[in-house]
Amino acid sequence: MIDGLDRVDIHSQAVGTNLFHLPRYLPDQVYFIFARRPYKKSHGGLLIEAPSQVLDLSDFQRENREDVQEFIRRKRTTETQSSQRNIIDLIDEDNFMYVQQVLTAFADGFYDQPENINSIPPDLATYYQQHWQKMQGQGLSDVAINILRVLTAEETPAMSTVAISKIIKADVFDVAEIMETWLEFL
């Protein structure tokens, strides 16, 4: 199993090669499982001539939440029960890294400390900082900054690139292009 495939810089690989130099054709009963954030197929970096299938974990939200709740139930102690009850309401079941880091923090006792109850674990903060740096690339354009303002406005509902372009008075294609490069982060 290969996790974090989205962290590979496909621009640094030679044209016509596979990520990690994996074979294009697989022998019978040889399987690879790749885990990654959402992406456009054209940015996948894999050349595979074998049957494949995609499993989108967002299609299993109820099961994911049940798994998280069961994990927390098993880790619960009398003194942390109330703080964990508060944290479970904050868990975003669509964000694997968030859930994984928060559950690890539970297991490590991070949330046993009252001052940490409203904090994100340090490793998660580092992860988000790395994503922010990757999103910025060589710097953010005025359009990108305006998109971020819209996306981070308090209680912003889900909206299309057309709606965002109207709000910031920018060309819809410019907005779509920026949003496409941010797909894995959104």
Image (cartoon, rainbow, N blue to C red):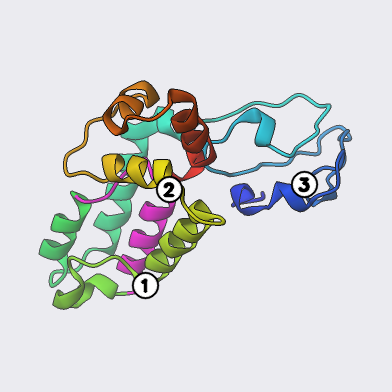
Sequence-wise first label, 2 or 3: 3
Marks 2/3 in contact by CB < 8 Å: the verdict is no
Q: Main secondary structure of the magenta part?
A: helix
What is the distance, in whole Å, between disc 1 and disc 2 at their CAs?
A: 16 Å
Q: Quadrant of residue 153?
A: top left
**Pointers 3 and 1 in contact (CB under 8 A)?**
no
**Number of numbered discs visible in the structure rendering:** 3
- The label on residue 96 is 2
Callout 3 crowding tier (Cα within 10 Å): few <14, some 14–19, many ≥20: some
Q: Is residue 61 above or below residue 129?
A: above
Where residue 68 sits: x, y (%)? 32, 49
Q: In the image, which disc is placed on residue 166?
A: none
Residue 97 image point, x, y percent: 43, 53
Question: Residue 96: image x %, image y %?
Answer: 43, 48
Tag 2 secondary structure: helix
Q: Are marks 1 and 2 in contact (CB under 8 Å)?
A: no
Q: Residue at x 28, y 45 (%)?
A: 149
Residue 95 magenta-highlighted = yes
At mark 1, the secondary structure is helix
Instruction: Please report the residue visible at 24 percent of the width from the left and 55 percent of the height from the top.
Output: 73
- Placement of 162 over or under 14, stated as above or below: above
Q: Which residue in the protein does label 1 denote?
A: 122
Amino acid type shown at disc 2: Phe
Q: Which mark is residue 19?
A: 3
Between the residue at mark 2 and the residue at mark 3, the CA separation in whole angstroms equals 22 Å
- Residue 27 is a magenta residue: no
Q: Amino acid at mark 1?
A: Pro
The amino acid pointed to by label 3 is Leu
